Image (cartoon, rainbow, N blue to C red):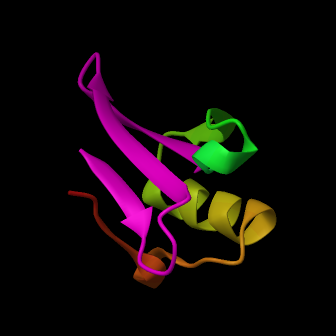
Amino acid sequence: MELACGCCGRWRVSVELIRGRHRYRLVRRYPAEFGGGKNVLGEVGTVAELEELLHRRTPLTLADLQEAA
């Protein structure tokens, strides 16, 4: 599953189940006109840690994320 910010879609959080535990990975995607690609900003194991990571590295909160299409 992947979540993306509702404003521009460049901030994304992927949710993976690894060995019975969820891992949340925060990624910033770059537009094609800037070469595309992505930069992993961090990976955490709980929603509370994800909220802190979002606060430290982005202008977003958990409420700004929605399921990506």
Q: Does the magenta run of residues contain 9?
A: yes
58 vs 31: above or below: below
User: Residue 50: horizontal and vertical position, in percent?
Assistant: 55, 57
User: Residue 44: horizontal and vertical position, in percent?
Assistant: 56, 41
60 vs 16: above or below: below
The rendered magenta stretch, by its main secondary structure, is classed as strand
Q: Does the magenta run of residues contain 15?
A: yes
User: Residue 18: horizontal and vertical position, in percent?
Assistant: 31, 20
Residue 10 visible in image: yes
43 vs 6: above or below: above
Residue 29 visible in image: no
Residue at the limit of the structure toward the top, as seen here: 19
Q: How many marks?
A: 0
Observer-nearest of 17 and 13: 13
Observer-nearest of 8 and 14: 8
Left or right: 61 in relation to 56: left
Instruction: Residue at 45%, 51% (x, y): give it.
Output: 13
Instruction: Residue at 47%, 64% (x, y): give it.
Output: 9
Instruction: Residue at 53%, 63% (x, y): give it.
Output: 48
Q: Quadrant of residue 15?
A: top left
Quadrant location of the C terminus? bottom left
Q: Quadrant of residue 60?
A: bottom right
37 vs 66: above or below: above
User: Residue 12: horizontal and vertical position, in percent?
Assistant: 48, 53
Left or right: 52 in relation to 65: right
The region drawn magenta spans: 1-29
